[in-house]
Image (cartoon, rainbow, N blue to C red):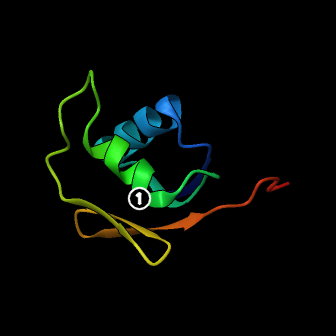
């Protein structure tokens, strides 16, 4: 399985993440964004257009929990 990291977890990043998690062919191993993880987890759970995820979404200790998966969260302004 191909491992993927997402740089930027705004609206498009969150939608791409949802698609990758539902599809199952890509393994999301890390997310990088400068916004606080708690805020991003809230936005992921409560999208104004798309239904709430069918899995539990939580955040804590630099990790986004998506169901039973743990995805590392980074907050690096210039990752290159």
Going 47% across and 59% down the picture, which residue do you hit?
37
> Is any atom of residue 1 visible in this view?
no
In this view, 77 is above or below 60 = above
Q: Residue 43: percent from the left, percent from the top? A: 36, 41
Going 79% across and 56% down the picture, which residue do you hit?
79
In this view, 18 is above or below 11 = below
Depth check: 53 or 43 in front? 43
> Is any atom of residue 6 visible in this view?
yes
In the displayed structure image, the side of residue 47 where residue 9 appears, left or right: right
Q: Mark 1 = which residue?
A: 38
In the displayed structure image, the side of residue 2 where residue 68 appears, left or right: left
Q: Residue 2: percent from the left, percent from the top? A: 53, 55
Q: Are there few (<14), some (14-19), or many (20+) residues within 10 Å of tag 1? A: some
The kind of secondary structure element at disc 1 is helix
Looking at the rendered image, the quarter that the C terminus falls into is bottom right
Q: Residue 35: percent from the left, percent from the top? A: 57, 51
In the displayed structure image, the side of residue 58 where residue 55 appears, left or right: left
Going 20% across and 43% down the picture, which residue do you hit?
53
């Amino acid at each position: 399985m191909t491992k993927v990291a997402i740089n930027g977890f705004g609206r498009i990043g969150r939608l791409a993440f949802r698609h990758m998690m539902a599809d199952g062919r890509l393994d999301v191993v890390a997310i990088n964004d400068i916004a606080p993880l708690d805020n991003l987890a809230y936005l992921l759970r409560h999208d104004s257009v798309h239904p709430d995820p069918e899995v539990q979404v939580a955040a804590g200790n630099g990790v986004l929990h998506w169901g039973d998966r743990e995805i590392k969260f980074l907050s690096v302004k210039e990752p290159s």
